[in-house]
Image (spheres, rainbow, N blue to C red):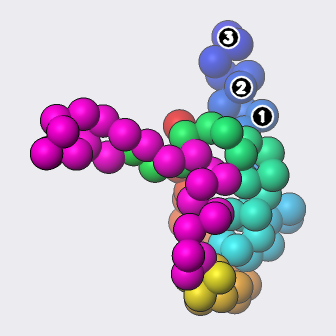
Amino acid sequence: MQIEQDRIASVIPVEIAKTLDGLFNERVQRSPQKEAYRYFNPISEQWSGYTWEQINQLPGMGYVRAGCAGSWTGGNSFIHR
C-alpha cells in the first residue's frame, strides 16, 4: 500500500511539467538525491548510479534541455522507479 502511494505521489502531471525540460526540472526539485540513472561498469564489474542532482550538474545539460523545451503534447511517459 505504501509503495503504491509513493508511486502515485512521484507522478508529475503534464499540467505541472508542461515540457520535457519542465519535467526534468520538477524531478530534480522533488527528488534531487534519488537515483536517476543506473549502469553497470564492466571493468569494475559493479553497478553505479547518478542522482537527479548529479545529472543536472553534468556539463552540456543546458544544450540537452534546450532541445526538450518544446510543448509536450502527451502520449509519452517518463518512467522513474
Residue located beneath label 1 in the image = 9
Q: CA distance from mark 2 to mark 3?
A: 9 Å
Question: Which of 77/60 is in front?
Answer: 60
Badge 1 crowding class, 10 Å Cα cut-off, few under 14, some 14 to 19, many 20 or more, is: few
- Is label 3 in a helix, a strand or a loop? loop
Disc nearer the start of the sequence (3/1): 3
Mark 2 lies on residue: 6
Q: Residue at x 57, y 59 (%)?
A: 55
Closer mark to the observer between disc 2 and disc 3: 2
Residue 67 x %, y %: 59, 89
Q: Which residue is mark 3?
A: 1
Range of magenta residues: 39-61
Mark 3, residues whose alpha carbon is within 10 Å: few (<14), some, or many (≥20)? few
Residue 61 higher or lower than 4, as above or below: below
Q: Could you tell me which residue is drawn at 43 percent across and 43 percent down?
A: 49
- Residue 15, compared with residue 32, is above or below; it is below
**Which quadrant of the structure image shows residue 13?**
bottom right
* Label 2 residue SS: helix
